[in-house]
Structure formats: structure tokens, C-alpha cells
Image (cartoon, helix red, strand yellow):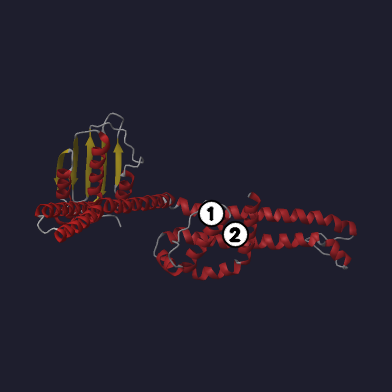
Amino acid sequence: MARIRMARRVLTECTAAMAFPILLISLLVFPVSSPVVAETDRSRARWCGADTMPLKPSDQSWAQWVSLRLRSRSMWRTDLPVLVTATLLSALSLLVAFFGFIGAAVLVLSPVFWLLGIAAQVGPFTPESVGQTLLAVPAGVVLGAVTATVLTGTSFLRDVFLRSFSRSRDPDLLAKLEELRTSRASLTAAFEFERQRIERDLHDGAQQELVAVVMRLGMLEAAVTAAASDQERVVRLAQQARDHAERALERLRETVRDIHPRELSDLGLIAAVRELAARSPLRVELTSTGDDSPLSSPTATAVYFTVSEALTNIAKHAGAGIARVELRCAATDVHVRVQDDGVGGARIDAGSGLAGLRERMRSVGGNLEILSPPGGGTQVSASAPSQPPW
């Protein structure tokens, strides 16, 4: 693997040497060529095994990306220095590869040239006998190896400059990219889990009740047709069908409420949380302060489902009979804390649904933390700005 990477580095340096005239021309149109050359150099580094990340999104065209990049400050402090460095190092690679490999080839082929009557000269060395041409062969091999080593070092030097311009000027760039990728993966998993939950609720809840309604109506129709005088059985079947229909309607209302509660859209976050506390099987002590009108819809939704998931986890796993919810709304941000005095020991990565809620909070510029020592109860705290940063 190491030999393959070294061969790739030598190959890319030879390619860069041949591309030196193109790089010189690109300097004349550097505002446009800088992002292209810099992204190409990042691709070269990845192909050679260096730890670099692409900046161009895969679903965006080069024209769109370059246009956006030209309006970014990082183009001037990252891409332009990479262009200048790439041009200078390509000039060096051109000199090393041209004189090194050509000289090595001439030395290795010196016996052949001697047989053809040509005394091939390499620098100050000119063979004057057959013995000297034979001695030139290993010298040519050594010169070729030295040239490949110098080109490999030049490739590593490119990586050093590339990382220096990309990381020293933007020290948090890679961390933000990694956090974004992790959040995207977590949100994708959370959305898939939510879709499966909705499908399960509809299949096991409303759908089953509606099937029962259809069956009862069929039996009711048969009873009416078979014995119109059997009014008691007809009434009983009608009541059963109505009961199943009412349960199906309630299941549908619960499913819709879990997708997005109507109270949140119509009355705001505080009223929606108050309604949520009233429906909870627990005794919930709710304390709310401030005005929730400045909250954006994404922020209010994230906070609401945080409270909902926390209360659900308390009812299922905490073994507590009471929960406390503190909700503070301000013009700039919102804070919520849900705590209980149950068994504790909850973990955010244990499949409780809090991991997906944390990513939801992060998607609106907030965060979610959990404190749950064994036997010491659980406290879920979340905060977010009133308006998402995007």
C-alpha cells in the first residue's frame, strides 16, 4: 500500500509538472481559477492518502460552487494561497522530473547509445569507453530513484501547505464538517424511526379499529337482512361499530397530534406544553415564564417534542409518579428542563429517542443535555435561540 501511494505521488507530481503552463495561465484569472485548483489539489491529496475533505458538495455543479466560493472570504485566505503554492511547486517538479528522469534514462541507455556510435552526455559526464557506459547504468537507476524521492517529498510538501492554509486559518472547519455529517446521519435515522412509528401506529391502531367497524357493519347488514325483527342484536352491532369508529378516530387524532400538535400552531408553545402535561398519565408540575410569541416554529416544535419525549420516558422507565417541567421563554432564546425523582441511569445513546431530539435541537442552533445518575433521578435540559441561525 505504501508503494502504491508513493507511485501515486510521483505520478501526480509528473502530472503537475506537465500542467505548469496551465497553472501559469490560471494565475491571470485567479479569482475564478483559485477554487478549482484548490479543490483539485484536495482531491490529489486524498488520492495520495492524505487526510483532507472536499469543500464542493457532490450535488452542486462546478459553476454554482465557484460562484458561491467567490463570495466567500475563505477563498482569498485558503484557495488563492493554494493556487500560488501549487504553481511554484509545479515549476520545481517540472525541473526535477525533466532533468532527473531524462538524465536517468540517458545513463541507463548509455550502452545502447555507445553501440549506435553516440556518446550520450549527462551534465559533465561523457562516457569514453564501454566500461564507463556500463558503470553509467546503475548510476542512472540511482538518479531515477533520487528523482522519484524528491518528487515524493515535493508531494508531501504540497500536503503540508494545503493543510496549513486550510486548518490554521479555519481551525474549526473540519470539526464543523464532522459535526454536520454526524448530525445528518442521526437525523436521518431519527426520521426513519419516526416514519416507522407512524406506520406502526396507523397499522396497529386506527387501521385495526376501522377493520372492526367494517366487519360490524357487515354483520349489521346481514342481521337486518336475515331477521328484521331482531332489533336487540341490530342495536348491539350498531353500538359496537360506533365504539370502534370512535376509537379509530381517537387513534387518528393521537397520531396526527404526535406528528405536529394543533395546539402548538394555534396557541403557542406554553399552551401546547400545558395541554401535553394535562394529557400525561403522570402528575406534572409545570412552571412557565416569559412570552413564547418570538419563538420560531422550528424552535417551538423542537422544544415541544423534547418535553413530550421526556415525559414519555419518565412514564415508561423512571418509576416516578411526578415530573417537573420548567419552561422559560425570552425574546432571544428558550430554555426547558424536565426532571423526575425516579431510578435514573438514563443514557442519551440508549435508544430512548433523546439522541434524535438532541440532533433536532442542534438543527435549530440549540443543544440538549441529560443528567441521570443511577438512583438520583433524571434531568433533561434543552435550550435554543428563538430564531434558528440559518
Q: Report whether residue 294 is seen.
A: no
Which mark is on residue 89? 2
Q: Nearer the viewer, residue 44 or 262?
A: 262
For numbered disc 2, what is the local secondary structure?
A: helix
Using a 10 Å C-alpha cutoff, classify the residue at mark 2 as few (fewer than 14 neighbours), some (14 to 19) or many (20 or more): many
Residue depicted at x 65% and y 55% = 7
Kind of residue at badge 1: Phe
Q: Report whether residue 118 is seen.
A: yes
Whole-percent x and y of residue 29? 49, 70
Whole-percent x and y of residue 102? 74, 63
Mark 1 or 2, nearer chain start? 2
Whole-percent x and y of residue 284? 16, 39
Which mark is on residue 335? none
Which mark is on residue 161? 1
Using a 10 Å C-alpha cutoff, classify the residue at mark 1 as few (fewer than 14 neighbours), some (14 to 19) or many (20 or more): some
Q: Nearer the viewer, residue 269 or 245?
A: 245
Whole-percent x and y of residue 18? 63, 66
Residue 357 shown left or right of residue 156 in the figure: left
Residue depicted at x 42% and y 59% = 74
Distance CA(mark 1)–CA(mark 2):
10 Å
